[in-house]
Amino acid sequence: LTVRVFARNASPSPVTGTLKGQAAGVSFQKEVTLAGGETREIAIGPKDVPALAVANPKLWWPAQYGEPVLHDLDMELAVDGATSDRAHAKFGIREITAELAKSGLVYKVNGRNILVRGAGWTSEMMLRYSPERYEQEIAYVKDMGLNTIRLEGKLEAEPFFDVTDREGIAHHRHPEQLPGTAARPRSPRLPRR
């Protein structure tokens, strides 16, 4: 398991702090120094904290293949003993692969072949969002036996992704919406977390 976070120092002076947290029940800590105005990704993995090499983790599975287990991630950055920022997120642990076979592209999640059952998703025309509406609409997606949706319009709000991750629904953007991807084959991306 590798924890990644973008850190930004908004001041013009260098800042050193302690990034600490817990992911899937494993505690971690790392000293971080950022130059004035610097933004960069900080990664903490098994080389930094051996316990992050989680043995037999509870895995995220797509709908119809198992439980979409999500874990908690809590982090905070302390500078001079005071909390500068903190964040919480949920994430799934899974391995996703694809291979080209004689029959076509074969997707695997956690080493198991899966049948991608998907459809296009378009935002409500008037862009009226609510977590309750996402809950209802994703329930319809599951009732139809789908496990993947392709976002056809704009990128949805964060509560949408919370619901799809929790319900085991994979999601990806239509390739033509991404710069330079019009010629790429369509392929699902399972939860971003």
Image (tube, rainbow, N blue to C red):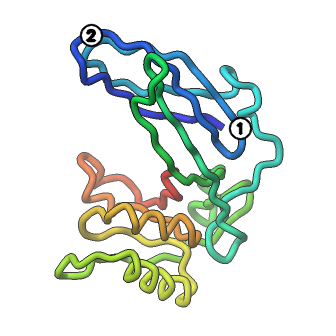
Instruction: Work out how far the residue at label 2 is from the one at label 1, CA to CA, in angstroms.
Output: 32 Å
Tell me the residue at 64%/53% (across/down). Answer: 71
Q: Give the image quarter of residue 10.
A: top left
Q: Nearer the viewer, residue 39 or 179?
A: 39
Left or right position of 121 against 146: left
Q: Residue 26 carries which label?
A: 1
Which residue position is annotated with label 2? 13
Q: Which mark is residue 3?
A: none
Secondary element under disc 2, as helix, strand or loop, is: loop
Tell me the residue at 71%/33% (across/down). Answer: 52
Q: How crowded is mark 1: few (under 14 residues within 10 Å), some or many (20 or more)?
A: some
Tell me the residue at 23%/79% (across/down). Answer: 128
Q: What residue type is labelled 2?
A: Ser
Q: Which of 74 and 116 is in front in this view?
A: 74
Left or right position of 60 against 3: right
Q: Which amino acid does label 1 sit on?
A: Val
Instruction: Using the image, determine if residue 27 lies above or below residue 16.
Output: below
Residue 28, horizontal then vertical, whole percent: 65, 29
| Residue 169 visible in this rendered orientation of the protein | yes
Residue 112, horizontal then vertical, whole percent: 73, 61
